[in-house]
Image (spheres, helix red, strand yellow):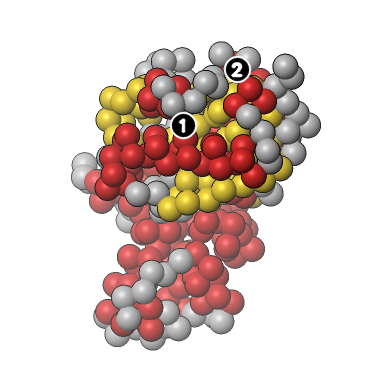
């Protein structure tokens, strides 16, 4: 029987987004449910399996129609064994999610870090495999990265490669050895929101003051609207993040001589018109001139679909095994 479909499950800290793709790599249908971290790893597996079965039911398909189920996890994962080393946002450590899922469905399960999975989608479907040395950086609640050398994803000696968000970076010329100087603690959406909140609490005027007063979440689109209204607080805090991002990307490129840097994630996608020129400018100031002169910095066009397409690329890499 022809196995003409794959399913990709993007397992996030706030949502589980799953999609059915056909043999031409078209997204046929999707399912999205909230992530319930409180139920533990086994509960997340139950939700993943339920999403898979719902997708099949919607298209009147059976498990035999699937080549594989690809799962993206926000943490350190071993694609060969299916073991999650650590996924802090999911409260999971040393858990074989592959075996747990395959106890409930008779389909090969493939596992990958979520940003690596997005990077595979970007490389294969956005760039048609025509990039060699690429860094993918997603800026949202935290900051995640994926590295590609000679066109292949680089997972590292123990599958930790790409953990760019946990790099210690300089701010105001100093480098303290604490978590306050981790890249994602300084330049993620969380960092930007913390800065905005602090300024508002210090009596700075902002169109986002209502969010702070009512204890509402400040999301990326709200920040974009504030910037469009020339809000000084939002402009300042996002500007700081842009300088830090540009500096980090410049330093990494000096080391690795990248040809392409792809940016994504909620904060970037909602604010790319404001952020991208500032990131590029700081990148040029930071990178060694001859190393970075041909480096392209772009924003992914795939958005949330990047990891969904990445599932198809992962299935091709591992052949459904």
Residue contact between numbered discs 1 and 2, judged by CB atoms under 8 Å: no
> Along the horizontal axis of the image, is 52 left or right of 178?
right
How many dots with numbers?
Answer: 2
Q: Residue at x 53, y 46 (%)?
A: 17
Viewer-side residue, 150 vs 85: 85
Disc 1 packing (10 Å; few <14; some 14–19; many ≥20): many
Quadrant in the picture for the C terminus: top right
| Residue 188 image offset from top left, x and y in percent | 41, 54
Viewer-side residue, 203 vs 213: 213
**Residue of label 2:** 320
Q: Is residue 251 visible?
A: no
Q: CA distance from mark 1 to mark 2?
A: 17 Å
Using the rendered view, name the quadrant where residue 128 is placed.
top right
Nearer-N-terminus badge (1/2): 1
Q: Is residue 231 visible?
A: yes
Q: Residue at x 59, y 57 (%)?
A: 269
| Residue 111 image offset from top left, x and y in percent | 48, 26
Disc 2 packing (10 Å; few <14; some 14–19; many ≥20): some
In this view, the mark in front (1 or 2): 2
SS for dot 1: strand
Q: Is residue 52 above or below residue 227?
A: above
Q: Residue at x 59, y 77 (%)?
A: 228
Q: Which mark is residue 199?
A: none
SS for dot 2: loop
Viewer-side residue, 112 vs 109: 109
Q: Residue at x 46, y 78 (%)?
A: 232
Quadrant in the picture for the N terminus: top right
**Residue of label 1:** 113
| Residue 115 image offset from top left, x and y in percent | 50, 37
């Amino acid at each position: 029987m022809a196995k003409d479909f794959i399913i990709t499950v993007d397992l996030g800290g706030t949502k589980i987004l799953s999609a059915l793709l056909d043999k031409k790599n078209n997204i046929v249908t999707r399912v999205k449910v909230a992530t319930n971290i409180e139920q533990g790893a086994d509960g997340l597996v139950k939700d993943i399996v339920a999403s898979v079965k719902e997708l099949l039911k919607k298209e009147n398909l059976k498990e035999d129609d699937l080549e594989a189920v690809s799962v993206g996890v926000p943490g350190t994962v071993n694609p060969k064994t299916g073991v999650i080393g650590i996924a802090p946002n999911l409260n999971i450590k040393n858990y074989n999610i592959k075996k747990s899922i395959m106890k409930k469905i008779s389909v090969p399960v493939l596992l990958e870090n979520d940003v690596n999975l997005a990077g595979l989608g970007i490389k294969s479907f956005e760039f048609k495999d025509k990039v060699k040395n690429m860094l993918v950086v997603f800026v949202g609640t935290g900051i995640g990265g994926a590295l590609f050398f000679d066109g292949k994803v680089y997972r590292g000696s123990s599958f930790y490669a790409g953990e760019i968000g946990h790099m210690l970076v300089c701010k105001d010329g100093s480098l303290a050895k604490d978590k306050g100087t981790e890249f994602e603690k300084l330049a993620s959406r969380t960092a930007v929101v913390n800065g905005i909140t602090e300024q508002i609490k210090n009596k700075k005027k902002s169109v986002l003051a209502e969010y702070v007063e009512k204890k509402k979440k400040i999301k990326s689109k709200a920040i974009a609207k504030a910037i469009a209204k020339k809000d000084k607080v939002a402009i300042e805090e996002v500007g700081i993040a842009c300088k830090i991002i540009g500096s980090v990307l410049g330093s990494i490129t000096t080391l690795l001589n990248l040809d392409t840097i792809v940016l994504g994630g909620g904060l970037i996608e909602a604010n790319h018109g404001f952020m991208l020129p500032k990131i590029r400018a700081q990148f040029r100031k930071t990178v060694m001139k001859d190393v970075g002169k041909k480096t392209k910095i772009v924003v992914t066009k795939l958005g949330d679909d990047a990891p969904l397409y990445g599932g198809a690329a992962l299935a091709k890499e591992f052949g459904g095994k």
